[in-house]
C-alpha cells in the first residue's frame, strides 16, 4: 500500500504496533527467527519497537534532549562544524571529482550526533562501519549476524566507557537518570536506545543532504530560485523529503487486531512496512506531477519523518543541520556541479536507506 492517506491513517491507529514481542505472534513464539539485518531493526528494546505506555516511557527520557528549543541552542556550534568541513573541501582538489557524500554529507551529522552523545573520536570509525551495515539490507545472513554482534559489542563497550568516564553529553545523562531510578531504563534498553539514536543520526540526515544536493544540481533553475531568495531553503528541504524520502521503507509494524482499510482487511498479526518514499510520490495526494521535483508546489506535506506517536524525535535537529549546511555549501561553491550524469549515481544497497553510494562533484570548474 503506497497511499499517503491510508498510510497516515495506519500510522496513527492504536491497532497498529511496532512491538514484535507482543504483536507478531510467530516471532513471540519463536517460530520466526530473523537471520537478516532486520534482526537489528525488529524486536529491539527501545521506543522504536515499543507500544503504548512502554513506548511513552522509553521515549520520554530521550525526548527531553530533543525539544526544538534545545536543538536551536546548538545552532552556532553546527555552523562552526559546517564551516570547518567547507574549509576542508576548499583546501582539497577543486577541479577534479570529489565525493561530497564522504566529504560533507556524512561528516556533519556524524560529528553532531557523536558529540551530542559523547562518542570518543577513536570509536567513531567502527561505529560508522557497523551502522552502515545495519542499513545494508543486501547482506548475507552470516554477514548480517556478524554486524549485529559487532554492533552490540561496540555499544556495551561504549556504555561501560561512559560509566567510567561520564561527561557533559546525552549518554552520560541517560546513564545518570538510570542510576538515579533503576526502573526507568534497564541496560538492554539503554543500549538499544543508543543504537537507535546513533543510527538515526548517522544515515538519515546524510541521505537528506545527499538527495537535496543532487536534486538542486539536476534542477539548476530551482537552485537559482533559492539563491535569489525567490524560494527558501525550507522549500528545498520539504520537497526533498517528499520527493526522495531519506528513509525509503521502514520495518516493521503489526496489526494488533483485524483492521479494515477501504476494501482491504489487514489481519491480526500481519506485518506492515511503512513505504515512506512511495507515499511521497502518491499522485492522489500530490497530483499528477508527484514524480517531479518542484520546490514551488502547493501541497508540501509528507510522511518522511513518520506520523503519530513514533514521529521522528530528531526532525528539528535534522532540519536545522540541513538548513545551515545547504546555503553554506552553495555560497562557498556557487559553481558546484555533478561530476557524472545523475543516471550514473548508484543507490546504496538498502531498501531502508535512500541515498547514493557516492556523490562525485566538481567544486569549481577548471578555467583552463
Ligand atoms: C532527515 C533525517 C531523518 C529522517 C528522514 C528520519 C526519519 C524518521 C522516521 C520515518 C521515523 C519514524 C519511524 C516509524 O515509522 O516508526 C523516525 C523516528 C525516529 N527518529 Fe528520525 N529521521 C531523521 C533524523 C533523525 C535524527 C537526526 C535523529 C536523532 C537522534 C532521529 C531520531 C529518531 C528517533 C529516536 C526515532 C524513533 C521515535 C519513536 O519511535 O518514538 N532521527 N525518524
Image (cartoon, rainbow, N blue to C red):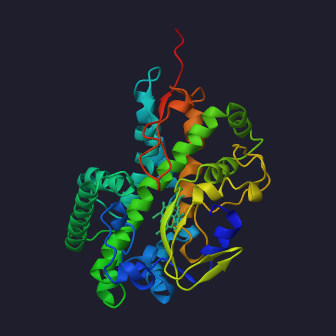
- Left or right: residue 305 compared with residue 118: right
- Identify the residue at image location x=54%, y=50%: 208
- Identify the residue at image location x=43%, y=29%: 98
Q: How many marks?
A: 0
Q: Position of residue 263 (x, y in %)?
A: 70, 73
- Identify the residue at image location x=25%, y=61%: 145
- Identify the residue at image location x=39%, y=60%: 199
Q: Which quadrant of the rendered structure holds the N terminus?
A: bottom right
Q: Position of residue 47 (x, y in %)?
A: 44, 77
Q: Is residue 290 above or below residue 363?
A: below
Q: Nearer the viewer, residue 188 or 367?
A: 188
Q: Is residue 72 visible?
A: no
Q: Is residue 306 above or below residue 233?
A: below
Q: Nearer the viewer, residue 28 or 367?
A: 28
Q: Residue furthest top?
A: 368
Q: Is residue 126 above or below residue 180?
A: above
Q: Nearer the viewer, residue 245 or 13?
A: 13
Q: Is residue 31 visible?
A: yes
- Left or right: residue 172 compared with residue 225: left
Q: Position of residue 164 (x, y in %)?
A: 19, 72
- Left or right: residue 61 compared with residue 326: left
Q: Nearer the viewer, residue 288 or 243?
A: 288
Q: Position of residue 286 (x, y in %)?
A: 75, 55
Amino acid at each position: 500500500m503506497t497511499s499517503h492517506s491510508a498510510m497516515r491513517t495506519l500510522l496513527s491507529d492504536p491497532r497498529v504496533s511496532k512491538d514484535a514481542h507482543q504483536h507478531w505472534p510467530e516471532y513471540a513464539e519463536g517460530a520466526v527467527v530473523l537471520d537478516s539485518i532486520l534482526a537489528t531493526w525488529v524486536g529491539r528494546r527501545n521506543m522504536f519497537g515499543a507500544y503504548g505506555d512502554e513506548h511513552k516511557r522509553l521515549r520520554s527520557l530521550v525526548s527531553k534532549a530533543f525539544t526544538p528549543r534545545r536543538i536551536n541552542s546548538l545552532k552556532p556550534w553546527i555552523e562552526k562544524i559546517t564551516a570547518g568541513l567547507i574549509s576542508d573541501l576548499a583546501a582539497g582538489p577543486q577541479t577534479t571529482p570529489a565525493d561530497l557524500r564522504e566529504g560533507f554529507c556524512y561528516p556533519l551529522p556524524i560529528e553532531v550526533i557523536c558529540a551530542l552523545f559523547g562518542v570518543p573520536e577513536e570509536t567513531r570509525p567502527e561505529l560508522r562501519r557497523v551502522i552502515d551495515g545495519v542499513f545494508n539490507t543486501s547482506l548475507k545472513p552470516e554477514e548480517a549476524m556478524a554486524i549485529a554482534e559487532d554492533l552490540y559489542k561496540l555499544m556495551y563497550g561504549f556504555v561501560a566507557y561512559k560509566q567510567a568516564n561520564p561527561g557533559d553529553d546525552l549518554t552520560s545523562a541517560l546513564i545518570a537518570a538510570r542510576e538515579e531510578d533503576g526502573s526507568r531504563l534497564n541496560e538492554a534498553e539503554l543500549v538499544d536506545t543508543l543504537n537507535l539514536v546513533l543510527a538515526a543520526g548517522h544515515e538519515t540526515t546524510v541521505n537528506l543532504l545527499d538527495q537535496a544536493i543532487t536534486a538542486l544540481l539536476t534542477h539548476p533553475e530551482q537552485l537559482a530560485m533559492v539563491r535569489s531568495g525567490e524560494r527558501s531553503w525550507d522549500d528545498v528541504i520539504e520537497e526533498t523529503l517528499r520527493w526522495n524520502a531519506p528513509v525509503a521503507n521502514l520495518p516493521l509494524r503489526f496489526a494488533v487486531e483485524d483492521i479494515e482499510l477501504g476494501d482491504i482487511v489487514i489481519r491480526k498479526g500481519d506485518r506492515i512496512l511503512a513505504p515512506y518514499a512511495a507515499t511521497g510520490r502518491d499522485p492522489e495526494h500530490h497530483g499528477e506531477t508527484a514524480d517531479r521535483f518542484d520546490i514551488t508546489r502547493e501541497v508540501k506535506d509528507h510522511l518522511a519523518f513518520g506520523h503519530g506517536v513514533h514521529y521522528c524525535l530528531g526532525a528539528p535537529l535534522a532540519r536545522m543541520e540541513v538548513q545551515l549546511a545547504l546555503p553554506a555549501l552553495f555560497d562557498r561553491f556557487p559553481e558546484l556541479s555533478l561530476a557524472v550524469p545523475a543516471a550514473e549515481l548508484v543507490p546504496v544497497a538498502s531498501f531502508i536507506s535512500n541515498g547514493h553510494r557516492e556523490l562525485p562533484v566538481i567544486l569549481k570548474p577548471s578555467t583552463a
